[in-house]
Image (cartoon, helix red, strand yellow):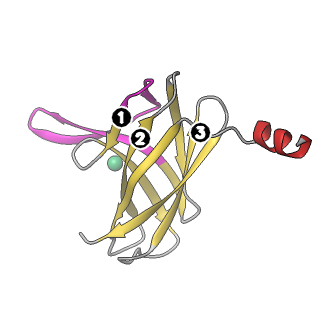
Amino acid sequence: VTCALISAAAEPPSALLVQDAWVRQTPGVDVAAAYLTLHNTGTRAVTIVGIQSPIARTAMIHETKIEGGMSRMRLKESVRVGAGETVKLEPGGLHAMLMGLTHPLTVGESVPLVLKLGDGTSLQALAAVRPL
Ligand SMILES: [Cu+2]
């Protein structure tokens, strides 16, 4: 019983669910965009402050905005998901940018993603590579 209690306390279940994670297939190794849906099942807001992947030298969250008829990407320092809310990273909006890939991504491959949360914990997800 003691062991079960300790293990439950050491690893509280995350209130943030990562759903439908996918990465656009890439011809090269410069850059790939990753998309996913975040759903906060908890009673407190969760903030994502960064993203990493073992297959990318650097990764960050970007926001695409249309400015003066031009589509521009800006670094998004943090993404807040309120209690009970769903936030989508999807084409044309928020996305994760993976840069300096270790290899070209092929369809069917699974790409590990690590979301860094504001409370210092992290959340892992697997993103499926989809065709262009
Ligand atoms: Cu981008």
Give how far across and how far down residue 45 sits, in percent.
49, 23
Q: In the rendered structure, are the residues bearing label 2 and label 3 in contact, judged by CB atoms less than 8 Å apart?
A: no
Q: In the rendered structure, are the residues bearing label 1 and label 2 in contact, judged by CB atoms less than 8 Å apart?
A: yes
Per the image, is 83 magenta? yes
Q: In the rendered structure, are the residues bearing label 3 and label 1 in contact, judged by CB atoms less than 8 Å apart?
A: no
Query: Could you say whether the residue bearing mark 1 is in a helix, strand or loop?
Result: strand
- The stretch in magenta equals 60-86
Could you tell me what secondary structure mostly forms the magenta stretch?
A: strand
Give how far across and how far down residue 2 sits, in percent.
91, 41
Camera-side residue of 72 and 21: 21
Camera-side residue of 116 and 82: 82
Q: The residue under label 2 is which amino acid type?
A: Leu
In the figure, is residue 120 to the left or right of 4? left
Per the image, is 115 magenta? no
The structure residue drawn at horizontal position 51% and vertical position 22%, both measured from the top left corner, is: 43
The answer as to whether callout 3 falls within 8 Å of ligand 1 is no
Q: The residue under label 3 is which amino acid type?
A: Ser
Which image quadrant: the C terminus? bottom left
Q: Kindly report which numbered mark, 2 or 3, lies closer to the viewer in this rendering.
A: 3
Camera-side residue of 64 and 41: 41
Q: Earlier in the sequence, mark 3 or mark 1?
A: 3
- Residue that mark 2 sits on: 38
- Residue that mark 3 sits on: 14
Q: The residue under label 1 is which amino acid type?
A: Thr
Between the C-alphas of marks 1 and 2, the distance is 6 Å
In the figure, is residue 17 to the left or right of 120? left
Give how far across and how far down residue 88 sits, in percent.
32, 41
Give how far across and how far down residue 131 sits, in percent.
26, 72
Residue 86's label in the rendered image is 1
Q: Residues within 10 Å of mark 1 (few under 14, many from 20)?
A: some
Image vertical order of residue 9 relative to residue 24, above or below: above
